[in-house]
Image: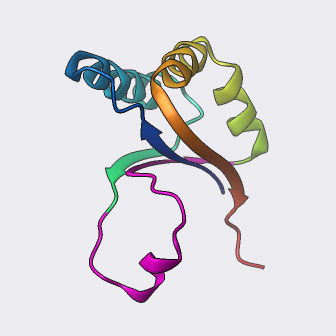
Amino acid sequence: MLAHVVLFRPKPTITEADREAMFAALRVAARDIPSVRRFVVGARVRHNAGYEALMTADFPFAAVMEFDDLAGLQAYLRHPQHDQLGALFYKLQEAALVYDYDMEIP
C-alpha cells in the first residue's frame, strides 16, 4: 500500500468560501478518482507532547490518501480531478509538504 501524505498551511488571507472550496475539492477527488482506496483529511492536534517542541514549521492540516500500488498513485496524480484540486491547492496554500510512502512491512 502506498500513502500520499500532504501537510498544508492555507494562506492567512483566504476567505471562508476559499476554504470550503478547497475541502470540497478534496472530497470530490476522494470520491471520484477510482484508484483512491482511502482518503482522510484532518486538523492538527496539540496536546503538549514533547515532540511538538521539535516542530519548526506549523502545518495545521493533513491529508492522507492510500493506494494499492504506485500505478494507483500515478493514476490519481494524472486524473483531471487531481489537476483541478492541485490548481486550487497551489492558489490557496502558504506552504505544504508532500511525501509518498511505501507502507508495506518488510
Q: Which residue is drawn at 31% across and 18% down?
A: 18
Q: What stretch is highlighted in magenta?
A: 45-68
Residue 44: image quadrant is bottom left
Residue 17: image quadrant is top left
Q: Which residue is drawn at 52% across and 44% down?
A: 37
**Residue 24 colored magenta?**
no
- Residue 87 in the image: above or below residue 74: above
**Is residue 7 toward the left or the right of residue 20 in the image?**
right
Counting from the top left corner in percent of width and height, residue 2 is at 67, 53
Counting from the top left corner in percent of width and height, residue 88 is at 48, 17
The structure's colour scheme is rainbow
Query: Quadrant location of the C terminus?
Result: bottom right
**Residue 57 colored magenta?**
yes
Q: Residue at x 66, y 57 (%)?
A: 1
Counting from the top left corner in percent of width and height, residue 46 is at 29, 70
- Residue 48 in the image: above or below residue 71: below
Looking at this rendering, what residue extends furthest in the left direction?
16
Counting from the top left corner in percent of width and height, residue 34 is at 55, 28
Q: Depth check: give the residue in front, 97 or 78.
A: 97
- Residue 21 in the image: above or below residue 62: above
**Is residue 7 toward the left or the right of residue 101 in the image?**
left
**Is residue 95 toward the left or the right of residue 77 in the image?**
left
